[in-house]
């Protein structure tokens, strides 16, 4: 075969990416749940038929799933090979959400489907969607004080939900019998399956046009080049060991912080990540399974080197030592509801804090680093039905060498955005009394951190139960190179006119609410970058003019400065 020319390779790279992007769009447009349809808490990708390694992933999918889905796909392949799963046939779609089989938390449900060419599996398509509820002790699945995974919801090993294209009514009945608002899940299930079927159609069109052998050659070459580009990016880092720490507020059960200790060693064109010295496995749900820990490192490096094409090749120069004996390597039955949305972001923060020492021009101070998980479940008497509402929220990004951090950006691990207030008020019996930037929350620095989000939501009717699994309530996002930390997360619940602050600050579950009760949240601001005394006085004056800081806050945070025009 003639060597693949550069133009064809580039076209096929874009084509594979487009397949994944179209799957993402199909999934969101067809889904019923606002968390998928509006917040885009989902991802789609193409994976190797041999070992499940990543070939391509949608640009609009959650980065944290970048490594996770390749591990869950690999697990399905291995379980089929050793007889623990039924062998696949055309039209089959496996469902799996078991965290210990290459997953995240139970609410992230993965579908895995083989794509056949000439009677053989050419590749696997996989996607993940965050289901609003998966059963368990609290609506929404975010149990802040679970001590075993069974308390968090229904755990599914890889089983065929679709057999030869038809939904298996028995498996579907088992799922519906174990989750809340089960009648609404069929919309998300059909949307998730439709995304894979669209991907199969588009992939077959590419294969028919260019030929299977050419596409296989292109996939191998793209992987090789991604590895080469990552190695070239790493090579510019000075050899040495870069150390950092990040902290989780608590595990939700024991009210003490958890420590992530990281040493990043640069050797030639590889990086070695060692989490030795991190806290031991915890009692509560802030343990992280290995796949999530690995994926957190990958996505952090993706933030630092976004120009490297995404495929399994980009991960090859990143050697993550298995953090055995720590809460970053959860084993059954450790609870894990906070791993994907919160612990993953503390891991990424530790990577940023280490790498900013090596690459100060490329790496930012710490971002907000919390998905703001707020689950509300109850009954709407006006509509005569139960509901589960899931609110995610953004926060401030860290400042960097060139400019201030973004305000109210999405979480470190995703592209998910808060669903529009109008959609939430239409779908659930709530009223958003306040929704704005959290002024004053950005950490001071030569380039300040971005601002978090402040919102307040009121229960309009009926009774409900609220649960929070957030983070950065005890410690604000870290500043870098002399910058100050961003403001920490804040949660206050108003019941019967009295204010209640969770003892664990960012975590609590099963809070009983009724009509008129309110929940107020302030998400973290980003860390500041560089010495605050070096900030341009004109920029400080502009921040004050815009209401981002009061004059008193500015003087306290940025030091003695002449404020022109004040």
Image (cartoon, rainbow, N blue to C red):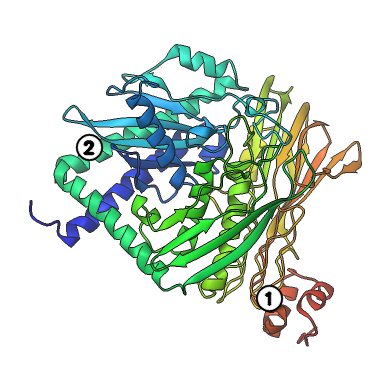
Q: CA separation, marks 1 and 2?
A: 53 Å
Q: From the viewer's perspective, is 41 left or right of 554?
A: left
> In front: 273, or 50?
273
Q: Nearer the viewer, residue 557 or 22?
A: 557
Of badges 1 and 2, nearer the viewer stands 1
Few, some or many residues within 10 Å of mark 2 (<14, 14–19, 20+): some
> Residue, x 67% and y 68% (percent of image)?
479
From the image, which quarter does the C terminus lie in? bottom right
Q: Is residue 422 above or below residue 308?
A: above
Return the mark for residue 204.
2
Disc 2 is placed on an element classified as helix
Figure quadrant of residue 507: top right
Number of numbered tags placed on the structure image: 2
Q: Nearer the viewer, residue 366 or 545?
A: 366
In the rendered view, tell whether residue 97 sits above or below residue 548: above
Residue 240 appears at what percent x and percent y? 50, 71
Q: Position of residue 184 (x, y in %)?
A: 55, 24
Give residue 392's quadrant in the image: top right
Residue annotated with mark 1? 482
Q: Image check: 135 left or right of 355?
A: right
Could you say which is closer to the camera, residue 49 or residue 199? Answer: 49
């Amino acid at each position: 075969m003639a060597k693949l020319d550069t133009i064809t390779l580039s076209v096929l790279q874009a084509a594979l990416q487009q397949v994944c992007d179209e799957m993402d769009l199909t999934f969101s447009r067809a889904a019923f749940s606002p968390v998928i349809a509006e917040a885009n808490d989902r991802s789609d990708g193409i994976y190797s038929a041999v070992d499940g390694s990543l070939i391509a992933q949608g640009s609009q999918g959650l980065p944290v799933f970048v490594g996770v889905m390749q591990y869950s796909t690999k697990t399905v392949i291995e379980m089929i090979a050793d007889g623990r799963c039924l062998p696949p046939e055309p039209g089959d779609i496996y469902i799996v959400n078991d965290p210990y089989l290459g997953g995240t938390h139970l609410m992230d449900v993965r579908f895995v489907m083989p794509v056949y060419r000439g009677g053989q599996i050419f590749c696997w398509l996989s996607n993940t969607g965050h289901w609003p509820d998966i059963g368990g002790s609290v609506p929404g699945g975010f149990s802040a004080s679970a001590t075993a995974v069974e308390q968090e919801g229904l755990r599914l090993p890889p089983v065929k939900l679709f057999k030869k294209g038809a939904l298996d009514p028995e498996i579907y009945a088992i799922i519906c019998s174990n989750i809340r608002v089960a009648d609404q899940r069929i919309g998300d299930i059909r949307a998730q399956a439709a995304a894979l079927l669209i991907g199969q159609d588009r992939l077959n069109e590419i294969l028919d046009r260019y030929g299977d052998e050419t596409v296989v050659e292109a996939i191998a070459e793209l992987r090789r080049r991604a590895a080469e580009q990552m190695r070239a990016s790493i090579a510019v880092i000075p050899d040495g060991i870069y150390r950092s720490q990040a902290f989780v507020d608590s595990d939700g059960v024991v009210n003490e912080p958890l420590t992530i200790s990281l040493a990043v060693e640069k050797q030639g064109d590889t990086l070695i990540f060692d989490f030795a010295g991190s806290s031991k496995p915890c009692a509560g749900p802030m343990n992280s399974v290995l796949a999530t820990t690995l994926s957190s490192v990958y996505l952090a490096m993706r933030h630092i080197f976004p120009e490297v094409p995404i495929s399994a090749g980009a991960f090859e120069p990143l050697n993550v030592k298995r953090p055995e004996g720590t809460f970053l390597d959860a084993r059954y039955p450790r609870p894990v509801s906070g791993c994907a949305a919160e612990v993953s972001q503390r891991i990424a923060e530790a990577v940023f804090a280490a790498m900013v020492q090596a690459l100060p021009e490329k790496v930012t101070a710490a971002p907000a680093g919390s998905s703001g998980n707020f689950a509300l479940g109850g009954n709407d008497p006006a509509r005569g039905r139960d509901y589960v509402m899931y609110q995610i929220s953004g926060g401030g990004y860290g400042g960097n060498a060139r400019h201030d951090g973004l305000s109210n950006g999405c979480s470190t691990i995703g592209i998910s955005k808060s669903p529009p207030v109008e959609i939430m008020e239409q779908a659930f019996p709530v009223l958003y009394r306040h929704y704005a930037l959290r002024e004053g929350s950005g950490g001071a620095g030569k380039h300040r951190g971005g601002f978090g989000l402040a919102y307040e939501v009121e229960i309009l009717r009926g009774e409900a139960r609220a649960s929070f699994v957030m983070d950065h309530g005890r410690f604000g996002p870290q500043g870098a190179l002399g910058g100050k930390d961003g403001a920490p997360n804040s949660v206050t619940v108003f019941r019967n006119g009295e204010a209640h602050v969770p003892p664990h600050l960012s975590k609590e579950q099963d809070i009983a609410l009724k009509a008129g009760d309110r929940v107020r949240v302030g998400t973290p601001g980003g860390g500041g970058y560089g010495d605050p005394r070096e900030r341009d006085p004109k920029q400080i004056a502009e921040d004050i003019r815009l209401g981002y800081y009061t004059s008193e806050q500015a003087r306290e945070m940025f030091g003695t400065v002449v404020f022109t025009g004040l």
